[in-house]
Amino acid sequence: AQRVTQPEKLLSVFKGAPVELKCNYSYSGSPELFWYVQYSRQRLQLLLRHISRESIKGFTADLNKGETSFHLKKPFAQEEDSAMYYCALLTGANNLFFGTGTRLTVIP
Amino acid sequence: DGGITQSPKYLFRKEGQNVTLSCEQNLNHDAMYWYRQDPGQGLRLIYYSQIVNDFQKGDIAEGYSVSREKKESFPLTVTSAQKNPTAFYLCASSMGSLETQYFGPGTRLLVL
C-alpha cells in the first residue's frame, strides 16, 4: 500500500542555518512526488515537484529511489520560510497521498 | 488570489442535517478533488472527478456525496451518515489527472 511519512511534526532552526524536512514514501509503482507549503493564513500551494527538478525559493528536493525518500532542503533558512510543509505522492490511480506535515519555524 | 474558491469559510451543522460545501474554479481545469484534513493527519481524498458528469470515490467517501454537472463546480454534500464530520475540507483542481493540483482556501465544518 502507498504511504507517505514525514517523521517530524515540528522543526525549528535558526535563521541562516540549513534546513532539511524529511519525507519517505512507500509505493510499488513509479512515484511522482511533490512538496506543498501552507504559509500562515494562506492556502495550500505547490512548492515543487520532483519531475521539474527546479529550485523554488531556494528549496530543492531530490528523489532517492534507493532510500525511497524525497527530502526537502535549503542551505540557509529565512524567517519567511516558516510554514507547514506537506510531502505528497501521486499514484497512477490519480490519488494524491499526503504526509501528516511538518511545521517549520525559523528562529530569528 | 482566486482561481479556485470555496464557500462558506465556516459552516455549522446540526445533528442529522445534510450540508453542502461549495467549490468553484475558473481555471478551466478538467479534474477536481475534495480532501478532508483532521488534526495531526495528512489530507485524505474523499471524492474526485476527472471530467464533467463523472466522479470516483476516494479513500473516505462514506457519508459524503458529490455532483459534477458543470466543469467549474464540484459541490460536496456531507450527509447525516457521516458520523464524524467536524474537519477542515479542501477542494482542489488540476488541468488533468496527473497535473499539479491547486487548492482552495478551505471550509471548516463544525457540528453543533
Image (cartoon, coloured by chain):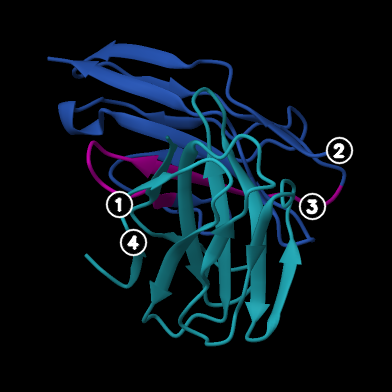
Which amino acid does the dot numbered 3 rest on? Ser
Residue B30, horizontal then vertical, whole percent: 56, 81
Please state which of the two labelled residues, at mark 3 or mark 4, is closer to the viewer.
4
- At label 2, the amino acid type is Ala
Element assignment for label 2: loop
Question: Which mark's residue is nearer the viewer, 3 or 2?
Answer: 2
Instruction: Classify mark 3: helix, strand or loop.
Output: loop
Shade of chain A as shown in the rendered figure: blue
Disc 1/disc 4 C-alpha distance (Å): 5 Å
- Write down the residue under mark 2: A1
Name the residue type under label 4.
Ser
Q: CA distance from mark 3 to mark 4?
A: 36 Å
Q: Chain of mark 3?
A: A
Chain on which label 2 sits: A
Closer to the eye: label 1 or 3: 1
For label 3, count other residues whose C-alpha is less than 10 Å away and answer few (under 14), some (14-19) or many (20+): few
Magenta extent: A29-47
Disc 4 crowd, CA 10 A, few/some/many (<14, 14-19, 20+) = some
